Image (cartoon, grey):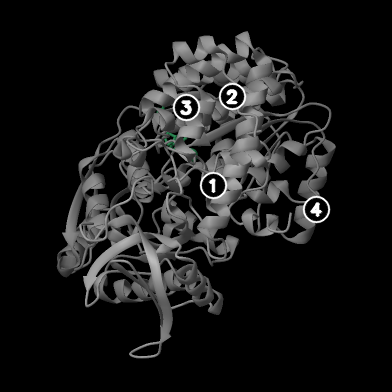
Amino acid sequence: MKSTGKFEKLGLRSGFDFVLHLPLRYEDETALAAPESAPEGRPVNLEARVLKARVMYRPKRQLIVHAEGLVLRFFNFWGSQLRQFQQAAEAGRRVRAFGELRRGFFGAEMAHPRYRIVDEGEPLPESLTPIYPSTSGISQAELRARVLQELDCADLADTLPPRLTRTYRVKGFADSVRMLHRPPPGVELSALADRTHEAWQRMKFDELLAQQLSMRFAYEKRRTRRAHALPANGALLRHFVRKLPFTLTRAQERAVQQVLHDLALATPMQRLLQGDVGSGKTIVAAVACLAAVDAGHQAAVMAPTEILSEQHWRKFNEWLMPLGVRLAWLHGGLARKQKKTVLEAVARGETQIVVGTHSLVQEGVEFASLALAVVDEQHRFGVGQRLKLRRKAQEAWPHQLMMSATPIPRTLSMTYYADLDVSVIDELPPGRRPVATRLVSAERRGEVLSRIREACAEGQQCYWVCPVIEESKEGDLQTALDTYASLGRELKGPRVGLLHGKLAPAEKAAVMDAFKSGKIDLLVCTTVIEVGVDVPNASLMVIESAERFGLAQLHQLRGRIGRGARDSVCILLFGAELSPAARERLKVVYEESDGFEIARHDLELRGPGEFLGERQSGLPLLRFADLQKDTALIEAARDAAAELIRTDPAAARAHVERWLGAREDLTHA
Ligand code: ADP
Ligand code: MG
């Protein structure tokens, strides 16, 4: 069909795509108003006999149509329209026009109404006129015609067995879609508009059900795959667990048990380890890696930034080197020859655990036997990168442990994370002090500087985080450079260091080293320190232009302090003019220290994109359902998914096919 191409812009390909392209709103053309009494200022449907039509050139070129008691004006028109109206006038036919009415010089007037030439007594439409989401180049008329045509020839059979529609009290599918495309007059328009109408509820339910089913299918498919079983009774693991560097919190203990249980199975683990910043996820990862090593295989630990990978490397070295584990760090600072040596050792299986960034998924990285992939800050990686790491394993699928410090709100974990098993570390190691947060206007920068001076004089260390400048990374860098220079001048005493993303890896490492060992008092930095940086002696953080940061980001940054023995303070410096949204964000970080609460607010303020990481397509994740408002439906759909798979797997497949078809797979395959 000729117009397939343009409909594709709207994501419409198959017939069912059109059926599920639901109206935004409706116009009521099912009744006629009289020109003399119709209200002004809102759309009305009128009909009048056409008397004459002509083109006027003053004050502006326009087509004027005189009908009985009604004048129509068109500023953009075709010559054919003039003829159409003239013929209608000669034949005594009528115009039926839908639009807003004004009372002007000639009486009732409409500009640019939607209209049709009709004969007297022609029946009115029996349903409201749907207005569809569209895009330039596609007219409503043509889109509507196509949608309604597809609706009439599609097989609208219900994918839900009647028992389920009863249990979950949802309307029939066919009735619901027909109702939405062609609502009868008298329908409760407000319920259609806010999507609380039962027909809408059914659509949302179906959408959520499809999503839940696809997650379950992905989960089940994984159960059929083979992985190396990594039993927890190996010598290294037992030794390490007996001599841990600290006592695990109960939450860590539980996470370790869950992970070890999964690893001992011959099906691939797909577990998300969730825990607020500083909750101690790294040690859980280390234990998991030992299980792989004990079983004679390899583990890879992938982090989103070089700095973070270095921290893992250090921790792993400190903990595992004494046990004789052979570790490697694949990083950008390696000379070509060193890199080659590292890669060869990994390929031969000599290296048992390799730590790195996305460099681990590049060409040329081969594993002898990769049994476990740990992905830190998983949402920072695209689906593609995680897949690539997985493909580095040969005969068996690797177990995957994904870690995230971004707490995932409940509705999201019920939906987009439903294909994962989740462990939560909901407890911080003992001795953590809550971080006090202060909101300080940038005008009081002087006071903040004295505070830094005092802190540094007492041997504390501080971070100064420079603002994010949305438009350019270069801008961020410039701000950091300027701040570094000016703080150096203004503060005098303290030793100031600079850390930003553009430094060469070796330089970054050197700066971090100097900060860790106390050779730098104040570290001026960009958000490169946002993830995972761990310097317990740092107890003061200043975030400049805090209003420019996102909620999750502020929470992550603040999590860098409060790790040592001292009370920590996070100062949020804000500029003069705060947008309402920025004010709201600052209020949330000021009032909340619980990552889950912050995440819930973040979801509310920004939607789910932030939690889900990169996607291939820009298509919305859910078209109809709303993660905030439809919690009850999400729960119902989850239960229904379980039941449908159990009782009627074929219907479950058909349902997913109908709703998701060729859409992008959102599972954590
Ligand atoms: P995150 O979950 O943010 O990755 P880390 O694993 O980096 O947290 O742990 C933060 C800090 O707390 C590290 O210095 C780590 O060694 C330490 N730590 C972790 N667990 C405990 C514990 N149970 N007791 C004391 N310190 C711990
Ligand atoms: Mg971490």
Mark 3 vs mark 1, CA separation in Å: 30 Å
Q: Which residue is mark 3?
A: 205
Report if residue 264 is visible in the image: no
335 displayed left or right of 128: right
SS assignment at label 1: helix
SS assignment at label 4: helix
Q: Which residue is mark 4?
A: 340
- The quadrant in which the N terminus is found is bottom right
User: Which amino acid type corresponds to the residue marked 3 in the rendered image?
Assistant: Phe
Mark 4 vs mark 3, CA separation in Å: 54 Å
Residue count near mark 3 (Cα–Cα under 10 Å), binned few <14, some 14–19, many ≥20: many
Which residue is nearer to you in this view: 463 or 624? 624
Q: Which residue is mark 2?
A: 213
Q: Which residue is mark 1?
A: 380
Residue drawn at (56%, 61%) of the image: 138
* First along the sequence among labels 3 and 1: 3
Residue count near mark 2 (Cα–Cα under 10 Å), binned few <14, some 14–19, many ≥20: many
Residue count near mark 1 (Cα–Cα under 10 Å), binned few <14, some 14–19, many ≥20: some
Of tags 2 and 1, the one toward the viewer is: 2
Of tags 3 and 1, the one toward the viewer is: 3
Of tags 4 and 2, the one toward the viewer is: 2
Residue count near mark 4 (Cα–Cα under 10 Å), binned few <14, some 14–19, many ≥20: some
Mark 2 vs mark 1, CA separation in Å: 26 Å
